[in-house]
Amino acid sequence: MIITLTTDIGWEYAAEMKGKILSINPNAKIVDITHEIMPQNIRQGAFVLYSIVPYFKKAIHIGVVDPGVGTERKAIIIECRNAYFVGPDNGLFIPAAKKLGIKKIYEIKVSRKASPVFHGRDVFAPVAAKLSTGIKAKELGKEIKKYVELDFGKATVEKGRIKGKVLFIDRFGNIITNITKENLEAKEFHVKMGVVEKKIKLYPSYGYAKKGEILAVIGSSGFLEIARREGNAAKYFDAKEDMKIEMFF
């Protein structure tokens, strides 16, 4: 199985993780998703994982966005159909794992030899490598029923108004929200974030808007995005992740 890596630790520390994986399974196929999640931003890491998992038919997904490393937080394996998630029990995997269907969750026993500040290398990488050789999850951990929950929340819809929040801001400055196509009542509306309010149109894609125009699209992950044609919508609205967004029709 492919092993993917999604972390906030940067490429040099990720290289140590890859070395550990390859020392256990020299034939492992490793795919770097990103090592540039904003530090300690669990929700951002969760959104990236949620977005990418449908495109891997069989994979072991390691996630390291772990501000609680070395504390009492659990290290876990989540078993899904044709996929495993290996990392901290802090909600990082839950939206993606629920998307695939959670079968069982196992707690990994952390060795005393593991660095208390780098479980990615000393705990998660070895476990993922062993899974990739065919070792069963039940041999690597003890089944548990409780885990830390995380979800993206649901937008609230009232007559002529939708209230949601910002899930993610990508490198283009596009603002991905938790509002879906089903929530929308019109193709033209006012958007308010913080003190900034703007009337915009919903287009099939970015290219339908004029250069510099603020627009809305349904993004590739199925959520409403606020964008700016050849510009940065996040700067225009001074948007931040987890910020409230309101839409008026």
Image (cartoon, rainbow, N blue to C red):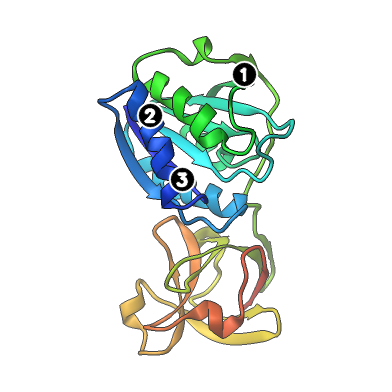
Of the two numbered discs 1 and 2 on the same chain, state the one appearing first in sequence.
2
Residue 186 coordinates in the image, percent (x, y): 52, 74
Residues at discs 3 and 2 in contact (Cβ within 8 Å): no
Q: Is residue 74 above or below residue 63?
A: above
Q: Which numbered marker is on residue 109?
A: 1
Image quarter (top left, top right, bottom left or bottom right) of the C terminus: bottom right
The residue at the point 65 percent across, 77 percent down is: 193
Where on the picture, by quarter, is residue 240?
bottom right
Q: Which numbered marker is on residue 166?
A: none
Furthest toward the top, the residue is 139
Q: Who is closer to the viewer here, 141 or 102? A: 141
Q: Which numbered marker is on residue 13?
A: 3
Residue 219 coordinates in the image, percent (x, y): 42, 63
Report how many numbered discs are placed on residues in the image.
3
The residue at the point 57 percent across, 37 percent down is: 118
Q: Which numbered marker is on residue 21?
A: 2
Mark 2, other Cα within 10 Å: few <14 / some 14–19 / many ≥20: many
Visible residue check, residue 60: yes
The residue at the point 55 percent across, 47 percent down is: 46
Q: Mark 3 belongs to which amino acid?
A: Tyr
Of the two numbered discs 3 and 2 on the same chain, state the one appearing first in sequence.
3
